[in-house]
C-alpha cells in the first residue's frame, strides 16, 4: 500500500497471496502513485524495503528515503555509537545523531474497516475488499480535510 505522508490518503493498494515478499511490487505502486499526480518527496518503508533496487529509487526521483537497514544488511561497530535513553537517540563518534520521525500504521483499516480478515474467498475477493476499504478510508480522510 502507498499512502501520502501528511494526509494519509491511500494512493495505491494491492493484495497478494501469503507467499508475497514485501516490496516486490514497489515499482508498480510507485508508478500508480505518480500517475495519480502525487509528488513524492519522502518515502518511508520497513526493513523489508531495504533492497538495492528500492533503496536507490527515492533518491533517483529526487525524494528522501527513510528505510531502516535490516540486521543482515551490514554489521555495525557498536563501539562507535552511543545511545541516550532520555532523548531516545543514537549518537556517533562524529557528533551526528538520529532524528525521530513519527509514522502511523494502517491500523484503522484493520480495526475499523474490516481488514483484519477476508470477507470472501479467493484472492480476487480480497483484492476487491482492499480497494473498497481504501476508497472508504480515503473518503473519510478527505471529508475531514475539507471540513
Image (cartoon, rainbow, N blue to C red):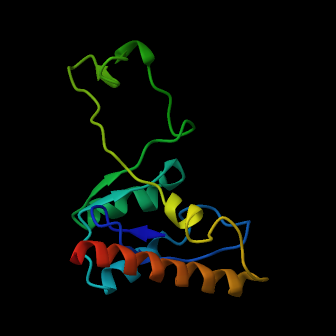
State the quadrant of the C terminus: bottom left
Q: Position of residue 100 (x, y in %)?
A: 30, 37
Outermost residue on the right side: it is 121
Height in image: 96 above or below 8? above
Height in image: 91 above or below 110? above
Task: Determine the residue positioned at 45% across, 55% down.
Answer: 52
Q: Position of residue 88 (x, y in %)?
A: 35, 24
Q: Position of residue 35 (x, y in %)?
A: 32, 86
Task: Determine the residue positioned at 35% across, 16% down.
Answer: 80
**What is the quadrant of residue 40 in the picture?**
bottom left
Q: Nearer the viewer, residue 72 or 128?
A: 128
Q: Does 71 sit left or right of 77 as displayed?
A: right
Height in image: 146 above or below 128? above
**What is the quadrant of residue 93 in the picture?**
top left
Q: Position of residue 85 (x, y in %)?
A: 37, 17
Task: Determine the residue positioned at 69% across, 87% down.
Answer: 124
Q: Does 105 sit left or right of 93 as displayed?
A: right
Amino acid at each position: 500500500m502507498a499512502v501520502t505522508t501528511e494526509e494519509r490518503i491511500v494512493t495505491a493498494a494491492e493484495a497478494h497471496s501469503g507467499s508475497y515478499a514485501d516490496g516486490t511490487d514497489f515499482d508498480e505502486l510507485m508508478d500508480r502513485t505518480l500517475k495519480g499526480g502525487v509528488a513524492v518527496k519522502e518515502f518511508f518503508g520497513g526493513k523489508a524495503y531495504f533492497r538495492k533496487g528500492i533503496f536507490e529509487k527515492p533518491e533517483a526521483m529526487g525524494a528522501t528515503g527513510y528505510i531502516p537497514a535490516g540486521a543482515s544488511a551490514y554489521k555495525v561497530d557498536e563501539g562507535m555509537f552511543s545511545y541516550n535513553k532520555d532523548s531516545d537517540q543514537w549518537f556517533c563518534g562524529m557528533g551526528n545523531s538520529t532524528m525521530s520521525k513519527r509514522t502511523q500504521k494502517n491500523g484503522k483499516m484493520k480495526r475499523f474497516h474490516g481488514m483484519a480478515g477476508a470477507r470472501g474467498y479467493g484472492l480476487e475477493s480480497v483484492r476487491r475488499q482492499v480497494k473498497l476499504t481504501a476508497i472508504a478510508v480515503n473518503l473519510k480522510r478527505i471529508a475531514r480535510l475539507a471540513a
